[in-house]
Image (cartoon, rainbow, N blue to C red):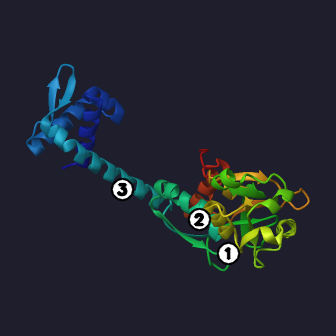
């Protein structure tokens, strides 16, 4: 059996006539009619009633249509995979970023990437420490910073992230929202542990929060996010990360002199930048962030 005959059968079933199917397939009407007759002869079944108004599926045709559609889809996948292999769009890409960032943005995005590039396998490595791309510890990374001019690496800026004080909707419903730093004394606060990076923003936050208001301390962005989602209290949070969760509310911004904003970068090596599989991931993630497809819909 020729799989192309099954595709023609599916097209006629969908279009209702050999003329419409021929236009859809880009082949002659006589060829469509001839291939349907050959398929019926091979199967020893009548698949269509040939009426003046068009082709109507018989009981046998209706029974076989779902299986024929599966064959058509399988053939299309094989052809797509073959084209991607020819273009180098196959193989493994090792991607690394911070744990909280990876779980929030990258892991959800991989389903969409996989649908577009089924033959590219992405290994996601989530670590707080930066892996050495030049040494081959990973192929692609998302990093934050103001200057990533490192020999052997190429970077593409894909966004900018700021920070503010946040709480959850459930917390706000029970305790209200703080509007200023002075209000924090009357709230439950998720503080920062000694291991949290000593950026000016963190130093300011620790200075304005009374010790008595602190209910728990966290040492990472991942811990702060978990605390917010649980309704444990208010704390600092990345605007970019918070935009993925509709349950979080932005309370107020820190003063301009301590407000930290960081550029977000896609990074790979000079050696890999033109590899088709790596380029595919870079371009996909750049579009993913440019279009803000990670944003949660408001409740």
Q: Residue at x 19, y 34 (%)?
A: 34
Where is residue 182? Give x, y as percent. 86, 58
Q: Residue at x 13, y 36 (%)?
A: 59
Q: Element under label 1?
A: loop
Disc 3 + disc 1, Cβ < 8 Å: no
* Residue 21 vs residue 231, the one in the foreground: 231
Disc 2 + disc 3, Cβ < 8 Å: no
The residue beneath circle 3 is 78
Q: Earlier in the sequence, mark 3 or mark 1?
A: 3
Where is residue 297? Give x, y as percent. 59, 45
Query: Any mark on residue 103, and which?
Result: 2
Label tally: 3
Where is residue 1? Give x, y as percent. 18, 50
Residue 232 as seen in the image, left or right of residue 56: right
Q: Element under label 3?
A: helix
Quarter assignment of residue 48? top left
Q: Residue at x 20, y 28 (%)?
A: 55
Query: Which callout, 3 or 1, points to the residue nearer the camera?
Result: 1
Residue 69 as seen in the image, left or right of residue 95: left
Q: Earlier in the sequence, mark 1 or mark 2?
A: 2
Calculate the distance from the C-alpha at mark 3 to the C-alpha at mark 1: 39 Å
Q: Earlier in the sequence, mark 2 or mark 3?
A: 3
* Residue 227 vs residue 289, the one in the foreground: 227
Q: Element under label 2?
A: helix
Residue 101 as seen in the image, left or right of residue 75: right
Q: Residues within 10 Å of mark 3 (few under 14, many from 20)?
A: few
Q: Residues within 10 Å of mark 2 (few under 14, many from 20)?
A: some
Query: Any mark on residue 18, and which?
Result: none
Going by the picture, which residue comes out furthest to the left?
Answer: 44
Q: Quadrant of the C terminus?
A: top right
The residue beneath circle 1 is 128
């Amino acid at each position: 059996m020729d799989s192309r005959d099954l595709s023609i059968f599916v097209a006629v079933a969908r279009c209702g006539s050999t003329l419409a199917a021929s236009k859809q397939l880009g082949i002659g009407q006589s060829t469509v009619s001839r291939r349907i007759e050959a398929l019926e002869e091979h199967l020893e079944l009548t698949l269509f009633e040939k009426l003046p108004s068009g082709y109507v599926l018989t009981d046998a045709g209706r029974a076989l249509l779902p299986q024929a559609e599966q064959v058509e889809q399988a053939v299309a996948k094989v052809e797509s995979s073959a084209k991607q292999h020819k273009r180098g769009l196959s193989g493994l890409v090792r991607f690394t970023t911070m744990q909280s960032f990876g779980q929030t943005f990258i892991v959800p995005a991989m389903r969409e990437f996989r649908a577009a590039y089924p033959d590219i396998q992405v290994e996601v490595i989530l670590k707080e420490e930066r892996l050495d791309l030049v040494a081959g510890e990973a192929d692609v990374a998302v990093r934050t910073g103001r200057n990533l001019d490192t020999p052997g690496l190429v970077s593409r800026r894909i966004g900018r992230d700021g920070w503010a004080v946040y709480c959850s909707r459930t917390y706000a419903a029970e305790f209200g929202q703080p509007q200023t730093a002075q209000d924090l004394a009357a709230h439950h606060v998720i503080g920062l542990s000694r291991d949290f990076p000593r950026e000016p923003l963190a130093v300011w936050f620790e200075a304005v929060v009374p010790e008595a208001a602190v209910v728990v301390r966290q040492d990472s962005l991942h811990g702060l996010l978990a605390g917010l989602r649980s309704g444990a209290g208010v704390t600092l949070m990345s605007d970019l990360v918070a935009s993925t969760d509709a349950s979080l509310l932005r309370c107020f911004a820190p003063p301009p002199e301590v407000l930290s904003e960081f550029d977000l970068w896609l990074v790979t090596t000079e050696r890999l930048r033109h590899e088709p599989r790596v380029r595919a991931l870079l371009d996909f993630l750049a579009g993913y962030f440019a279009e803000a497809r990670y944003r949660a819909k408001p409740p």
